[in-house]
Amino acid sequence: MVKIPMLDLKRQIIPIRQELDAAIKRVIDNTNFILGDEVRDFESEVQKYCNAQYAVGVSNGTDAIKLALLALGIKPADKVVCPAFTYYATAGAIAAMGAIPVFADIDLPTYNISAESIEEAVKKHPRGKIKAVIPVHLYGQCADMDGIMDAARKHKLKVIEDAAQAFGAEYKGKKAGTIGDCGSVSFFPGKNLGAFGDAGMVITNDKTTAEKLKILRNQGNKDKYYHLVLGHNNRMDTIQAAVLMVKLKYLESWNEMRRRNAAYFNEQLKGAGIKTPFVPGYTTHIYHQYVLRLDGPSDGLVAHLRAKGIDARVFYPVPLHLQECFKHLNYKKGDFPESEKASVQTLAIPVYPDLTREELDFIINSIKEFLK
Ligand SMILES: Cc1ncc(COP(=O)(O)O)c(C=O)c1O
């Protein structure tokens, strides 16, 4: 029986239930269910929150990446660099629009790609074939964007920050997703800011890109029934925007509670023989996941915690270059050693804001009991 789940959304929703009900009721009363007023208002709230020029509400975080690639002019058969160690959707979105993922290894301590790994990926491919790079801000902390932007500009690559897991994190004072040409965000229910279904956002500071995104998300429509380009049905639902607008007010305090829980784990696990998250000075961490690492395989510890009812998990057990669906790209075991290590040696433990001190201590003591 699971005693401590990875996330307990009921605990988050109960204190704000009346606000959420009222927001949803307003949408039902207005019946403007797709791209309604709340979508426009939420876009403007996200612009303010991120200090970005434009925010375009879309159907989910995967489509946000796909639309960003299209808006930035990436074409089928173009190559796009992304980490070998990330959630499937990063590379899935590249493949979905007919482009080809080119994997790059991560820097093990941060789990993110670096300028060096982009350089290596570029070296292995014929000049000019690679058109973009998607750094992922994995688990909720930013990749080293200064280095990544320099490498990208040097090789004339467009940059899409996959900020699906990092909405609210900051790189040198700038919000994740606002540094590259576009940033993509997921509001999947389990994210730190989660909708009541699928939803996502593309952030950009470029007016032309924002205009293209708005057309692309809505069937290529500029004016109704006049289709400028081959667009998609990737619009945001108004109910999701209404829910997200209520929740956005609480995001900073929820992220702070995650940071407090992470700090407690760090302190209590010091010297226990396990690596706690490494957070470089250039980024803040919103702890979408709190990820520990052992020197060897983590499966024994995961099984031990799960047997105690703690929902420990490995994000992600198979790096993308070894996934069946990318077999045709001809990568092999050993190609990205750091990604392969991360997939074997890491585990995530629950870190959500509403965990009690008793629950945190139970998790800590269970880890220590295994490591003894
Ligand atoms: C790193 C990363 N990229 C992209 C996505 C895709 O987001 P969505 O599930 O909203 O399509 C996710 C979501 O799980 C993710 O974690």
Image (cartoon, rainbow, N blue to C red):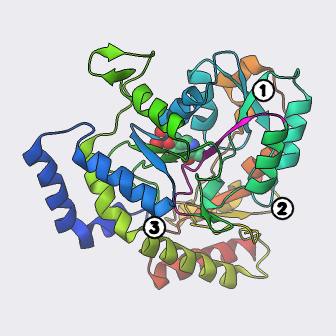
* Mark before the other along the chain sequence, 1 or 2: 1
Q: How many angstroms separate mark 1 from mark 2 (CA)?
A: 35 Å
Comparing marks 1 and 2, which lies closer to the viewer? Answer: 1
The residue indicated by pointer 3 is 4
- Identity of the residue drawn at 47% across and 68% down: 352
Residue 17, x across and y down, in percent: 21, 66
Q: Secondary structure at mark 2?
A: loop
* Mark before the other along the chain sequence, 3 or 2: 3
Highlighted range, magenta: 155-168
Which quadrant: the C terminus?
bottom right
Identity, as a three-letter code, of the amino acid under mark 1:
Ile
Q: How many angstroms separate mark 3 from mark 2 (CA)?
A: 25 Å
- Identity of the residue drawn at 75% across and 72% down: 281
- Residue 312 as seen in the image, left or right of residue 84: left
Residue 77, x across and y down, in percent: 69, 15
Residue 47, x across and y down, in percent: 44, 56
Identity, as a three-letter code, of the amino acid under mark 3:
Ile
Q: Residues within 10 Å of mark 1 (few under 14, many from 20)?
A: many
Query: What kind of secondary structure does the magenta stretch mostly adopt?
Result: loop
- Residue 293 as seen in the image, left or right of residue 38: right
Which quadrant: the N terminus?
bottom left
Q: Is residue 95 visible?
A: yes
The residue indicated by pointer 2 is 295
* 312 in relation to 265, above or below: above
The residue indicated by pointer 1 is 130
* 174 in relation to 200, above or below: below
Identity, as a three-letter code, of the amino acid under mark 2:
Asp
Q: Is the C-beta separation of discs 3 and 2 under 8 Å?
A: no
Which picture quadrant has residue 86?
top right
Q: Is residue 353 visible?
A: no
